[in-house]
Image: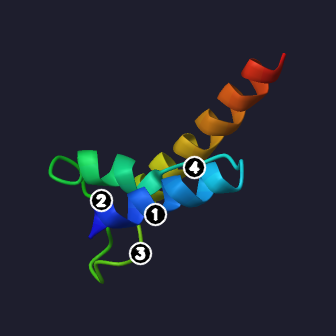
Amino acid sequence: MAHKLSAAYRKAAEENQALLADVGEVFFRQADTQPLYAADGVHPTELGTRIAAETLASVILQHKENRL
């Protein structure tokens, strides 16, 4: 499911010439080694929130650097 969602997000970003911060893909790669989701299985833990924010910031900064 996560891979299908990531593919759909990637396609939408390409079609709309938008940035993509694929937090779900980052979570998927780390989920077995880090507690990224709260007990409800939906919301991120504090660590998950930090990783999401770092992913977003990284994409924005990389885009900004590429434009310079």
Q: Which residue is mark 1?
A: 8
Residue at coordinates 71% horizontally, 48% vertically from top-left? Answer: 17
Q: Nearer the viewer, mark 1 or mark 3?
A: 1
Compare marks 3 and 2 and give the one earlier in the sequence. 2
Label 3 Cα neighbours within 10 Å, binned few <14 / some 14-19 / many ≥20: few
Q: In the rendering, which numbered label is found on residue 17?
A: none
Q: Which residue is mark 2?
A: 3
Residue extending furthest toward the top: 68
Give the side of residue 44 with respect to residue 31, left or right.
right
Q: CA distance from mark 4 to mark 2?
A: 20 Å
The structure residue drawn at horizontal position 64% and vertical position 55%, both measured from the top left corner, is 15
The CA span between labels 1 and 3 is 21 Å
Q: Decide which of tag 1 and tag 3 comes sooner along the chain.
A: 1
Mark carried by residue 43? 3
Residue 21 lies, with reference to residue 8, above or below; the image says above
Q: Which residue is mark 4?
A: 53
Can you give x and y, in whole percent of width and height, for residue 48 in the image? 41, 56
Is residue 47 visible from the viewing direction of this image? yes
Q: Hey, what amino acid is under mark 1?
A: Ala
26 with respect to 56 (left or right): left
Q: CA distance from mark 4 to mark 3?
A: 14 Å
